[in-house]
Every structure is written in structure tokens, then in C-alpha cells.
Amino acid sequence: MSSTRLVPEQAPLEALRKTQKQTQKTYEYNLQPASTLQKDLDALLRKVAATPPNSDAALDPAARAEMLKSVDGMLSRMRGLKRKLADLEKQSDRNIRVVQTRLDHLAALPASMDTPEYAAWARKRLSHHLVDYFHRTSPPLKQTAMALAEEEGIADLVDDELWDEMAKVERGLDEQSLDEILSWVGENRTALKKTKSPLEFTIHLQAYIELCRARDPVGAIAYARKHLSPATAVEATPEGETPAGTVSPMEQLSRAMALLAYPPDTTCPAYREMYSPARWSTLRNLFRTTFFALHALPSVPLLHISLQAGIASLKTPICVPVPQGAPTAPPSAYPLGGPPLRTTITPDGEIVLTAPEGPSPPSTGAPPTPSPAAGTGGAAPSTGISSPAAAAAAAAAPPIHTLEGRPSRECPLCSSPLCKLGAEVPYSHHVNSTIVCGITGKVVEGDGGEGGQLVALVSRATGEGRVYSKEGLVLRASQHPSGKIVEPVTGEVFEWDELKKVFIS
């Protein structure tokens, strides 16, 4: 894990941008030369300048009262402007504090997982992922998320207001109300237009459908003239080609115009689909996707992303066996630098690699019979084809790679319920083996580098060997009265000259 690969979430930056833009608009609306306040002030100054200082008009109580009333109105507006700008300043300060807190959190990432500070940092990161997960559930577990954030002291790492905003709109859609989502679209119309999001068009189309469902043709036609048009449909068309199986906004508009002639109980598939209540779920999913994209949030919980990355980095055919008849092998089965190979997993867990020009390997059944042409180092699938080209291709086929090993108690994927989630992620691609010493719990590189040297203890009774780091065996021997090595699993006693040095290939 590297600190250069971690970036702060975009949500507080987006909130800071919106606050700055709102502040700018407030200044321009109230203080620019064409504003109402400036016009009233200029009119008052002109009236005062046009009145001679010693004339009777200057002492007219009605004129004085009108001027004082105008001044009071301007003071009242200025006080309101001051309160509004003060609130915006507080929001801006809070957003800046949140951004700084998140940058500090990422900057505090320890250089190594072995440092004492990493556990506290990782716990805070995990709590952030859990709070994100609670907010994304349906319905959201808001109280649980707030309690966890307060308990772990990560309030500035969580966007409570953002999730509340999304939950409010989703509640309205669940109740088949468009008021909340239309209000949200009005606040974010500029950003939606930049991305050519079809959300606003879909909302207005749904409102038009509801008017047709209520059999209000006059209202539906008026609504369509105001909010639906070919130009609107073109603006809502995303960049690129429309995905297969979906209907473009222009096609939806064409169908919608004919919807006036079809009642809600129509049997015509195209218009029955437009009246379907499932469109509300589709609209809800579209809003959720648009909301995440607008705030640069992932579409899946951060907890899921972390779990998928962790499980995929650990998953091997030993941890999660390859299903019988699987069409492809794990990436680690492919040789580096070679051409793409066809792969098959046999019921016995053997990975059969076949050259592209060779015959198709069997997907089920017993392992293929070795061919004399393949030599002593491998086996080629039997095809029953006797042509010279097929025989040459079969002879060139790589050997069978048998998976050796068994689940380990030290592996998180083998020894925990995470194994059930392993089937949903790809296999890890290990170019070289990774050995973890069962005594020290550290990764052993095998060449005297990090983790020390790699050695094996071969049982005299069974001939089976187990691999450990030499440093771990030294620690083990220091606990023996005679300084001998006791095998941690079998309890056999070994002399130092019985160690077998092991190299990772």
C-alpha cells in the first residue's frame, strides 16, 4: 500500500465548490451595479442631491419619512445579506476543515504495515468504510453510522449531509413523488448538463406518464410542451452510442407522444412497459448512479471494494478450488511471455494448458493420457485425430500442472468465512510463490533477504517436508535444552546438519 495511491474523496471538494459558487452569486445579486439595493441607494442619493439644503422640501415630514423608510429597507436587506454571507462563511470554513482533515488522514498513512501506528490508522479507515456501508443500505442505517462515527472520532471523514440529501430524494421516489428529485435537479442542473445526464428528461417523462395514467390529456399535452421536446431529448442523449437493449431518449419521446391513445391497462408491450410501476425503481437507480457520479463516489460500498481487493490478492486454487469443468484456469496458470493458451480444469484439480493451434482439451472426465510424443515431462490431451498436424500440435502442448498443497490455518481466506466470498472474485496472479514462516509469521524471500533463508525439515518417517525460515528455527532451537530443532507440527527432533535449503522458483 502506498500513500501516493490514496486520494481524498471528492464529496467535500464538491461541497466547497458549491458554497463558493453560491457566495459569488449572492455577492453579485446584492452588490452589483444592477442590483435592487444599488438602484434604491442611487435613487435616494439623487433625491437628496436634488433637494436644496435650506428649502422647505428638506423639512417636509412626508419626504423625510419616505427617505427614512427607504434607508430602513436598505439596512434591513444589508443585515439579511450579512447573515447569509456569515452562514456561507461558516459552511466554507467547515468544508475547508473537512478537506484538510482528510488530507491529514491520508498523509498519516504509515510507511509500513509493521509500524505501531498502522493499526490505529487502519482501524480509522475501516470505521470509515463501515460508516459508508451503513449509509448506503436501503433503508440507510443513519443512527448506527452516526454512533460509530462519533465513537471512532471520524465525523470529519464522513459526509452525513451528503447521504441525508440522497436519502431524502430516494424516500420521495419510494413514495412515487417527484418534488424532491426535481428540487435536487434544479440545484445541480449545470453539472448535469455538462455530463449530458438523461436524469432530468427521465423525471419529466415520468411526470408526463403519470398524467397519462390519470387520463388527463390536456394536462399531459401542456406538460409535454413545457418540459418535453426533441431538443430536450437530444440534450439528454449521453455521449457515444446507445447501449444495446436500451431505448434512446428520442425513441422514448416518440413513444410518449402516442401514450395518450393508450389506457393504463393496455396490452401493447411497448406502452404497457411505460405504464409499469417498475419505472420508479429504474428512475431511483438512475438517480443513485447520477448522484454518485456527480460527487465522484464509487457505485459500490468502499467496504466491498476493500474486501474484493483483499480476497482477490489472496485467492488461489488451494483456498477456493476451481469448479469442475471451468472453462479457464486462474491467471497464475499461464506462463509469462508465452502465447495465449487454452486451459481446462480436470475433476482432479489439474490444469491442462493447450496451444491455440492444438486440439481442444477435454472439459470433464479423467485427466488426459500422456502421449509418447510429449516426452517424459508432460502429457497431452488425446483427441483421436491421427493427422500429422494434429500430432505435432499435441506434441507441442505444455504439460499438465497439478495443484499441490492444502488449506493453511495461517491463510485468512482458508481459515475464515471469507472463503464463501472467494468464488465471486478472480484468482490472484502470483508470478513467484510467497512463503510465510509458520513460526515467525513473516514472509520469507528465500535468498537471505527479508524474512531470512528458507529451509525444510524432511520427516524421517513419512518423507514429507515442511518449510520454515532459518531464523524461526533458531528461535525454536533456543527453547530446547540441547539446542536442537523440534518440528512444530510433528514434534520430531532434528540436528542442524539435517536442514535442507530451499529455493523459490
Image (cartoon, rainbow, N blue to C red):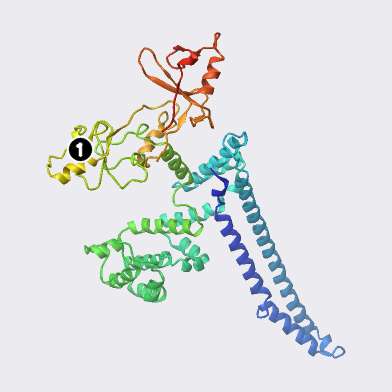
Identify the element where label 1 is drawn: loop
Q: Quadrant of the C terminus?
A: top left
The residue furthest right is: 54
Q: Amino acid at mark 1?
A: Pro
Left or right: 24, with 499 as reference point: right
Q: Which residue is mark 1?
A: 381
Residue 283 found in image quarter: bottom left
Left or right: 34, with 266 as reference point: right
Q: Measured from the top left, where is residue 423 in percent x and y?
A: 35, 38
Left or right: 149, with 44 as reference point: left
Give me the residue at 51% from left, 68% from top. 190
Q: Measured from the top left, where is residue 204 in percent x and y?
A: 40, 68
Task: Decide if residue 434 is in sight here.
Answer: yes
Give me the residue at 38% from left, 13% from top. 460
Q: Measured from the top left, where is residue 464 in percent x and y?
A: 37, 19
Task: Decide if residue 360 is in sight here.
Answer: no
